[in-house]
Amino acid sequence: MTKIIIIASGKGGTGKTSLAAGVGAALAKRDRKVLVVDGDSGLRNLDIVLGMSDRVVFSFADVASGMIPLMEAAAKYPSMEKLFLLTAPAEPLKSGALTAEGMRLLARQADDAAFDYILIDGPAGLAEEFGAFAAVADEAVIVTCGGSGSLRGAERMARLLEDEGVPMVRLVVNRIRRRLIRRGAIGTVDDAMDATGLCLLGIVPEDEEVSVAAGNGRPVSSEKTRSAAAAYRNIALRLEGEETPLMRL
């Protein structure tokens, strides 16, 4: 059965697209068949982060409408047999264009194609499409950077997804910078958990390699124990149900 996870944030700039790409790649390297879906209609960039802009033709809306079969629309990542991308429409969707039933059609096709995971990189903020994405989600991951504005948006998004009936909602604190925590510019991980009322799925350190990798169109990769790539691998393990200690920063 395909596990569907929506990755969300209350505002833009939290790094959820890099997280979707990094965790998707980490799961694929564990021999899981993974579909990453760019859910940000009109503002898509997951194809850029993965270096697949020349490979995408059809969008999730084409599949959800029944126009194009999933496996015709999904593009395979060149160097990973188990990683696939389904992009977003280039233009914003019209109101009501994406329905819960359309997303269920997409989910059934993913199940038939033996995908282990769908990771939906949701749009920032409270886009209309969230209702359709939430209707098929088994879990949600809220991404925050720890600042007061980011935490407020994360708390609001968490409550929205809980109201939509998503069974499990967990938190990732991204781009952690110890220097800013010490100076009081951003809160601690405990502060983020308290503010959102969510259990912690993972923490990700600030890592310039994320920007370098995105600029080169590839998922971030590093063997360093205190890197974003290592954090993504740890999050992938926890999504698989494995107990993994939090990274010490």
Image (cartoon, rainbow, N blue to C red):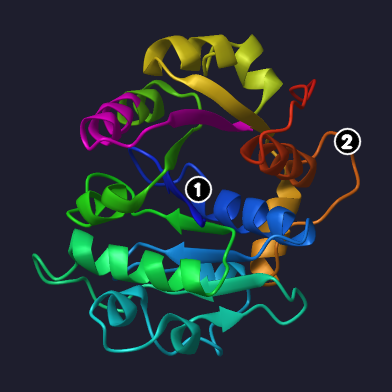
Mark 2, secondary structure of its residue: loop
Q: Is residue 188 visible?
A: no
Figure quadrant of residue 221: bottom right
Mark 1, secondary structure of its residue: helix
Q: CA distance from mark 2 to mark 1?
A: 21 Å
Q: Position of residue 9 (x, y in %)?
A: 39, 40
Count of picture labels: 2
Up-down: is 249 above or below 108? Answer: above
Kindly identify the residue that appears in the image at 39 percent across and 30 percent down.
Answer: 150
Up-down: is 85 above or below 116? Answer: below
Figure quadrant of residue 60: bottom left
Q: Position of residue 20 (x, y in %)?
A: 56, 54
Q: Write down the region rendered in magenta.
A: 155-175
Bin the neighbour count of mark 1 within 10 Å (Cα to Cα): few under 14, some 14-19, many 20 and up. many
Q: Is residue 26 visible?
A: yes
Kindly identify the residue that appears in the image at 25 percent across and 77 percent down.
Answer: 91
Up-down: is 94 above or below 246? Answer: below
Q: Position of residue 199 (x, y in %)?
A: 51, 19
Q: Is residue 75 left or right of residue 97?
A: right
Kindly identify the residue that appears in the image at 53 percent across and 83 percent down.
Answer: 53
Q: Position of residue 88 (x, y in %)?
A: 37, 72
Q: Nearer the viewer, residue 68 or 17?
A: 68
Q: Is residue 101 left or right of residue 21?
A: left
Q: Nearer the viewer, residue 146 or 31?
A: 31
User: Can residue 69 be found in the magenta stretch?
Assistant: no
Image quadrant in which the C terminus is located: top right
Identify the residue position indicated by label 2 in the image.
225
Identify the residue position indicated by label 1 in the image.
16
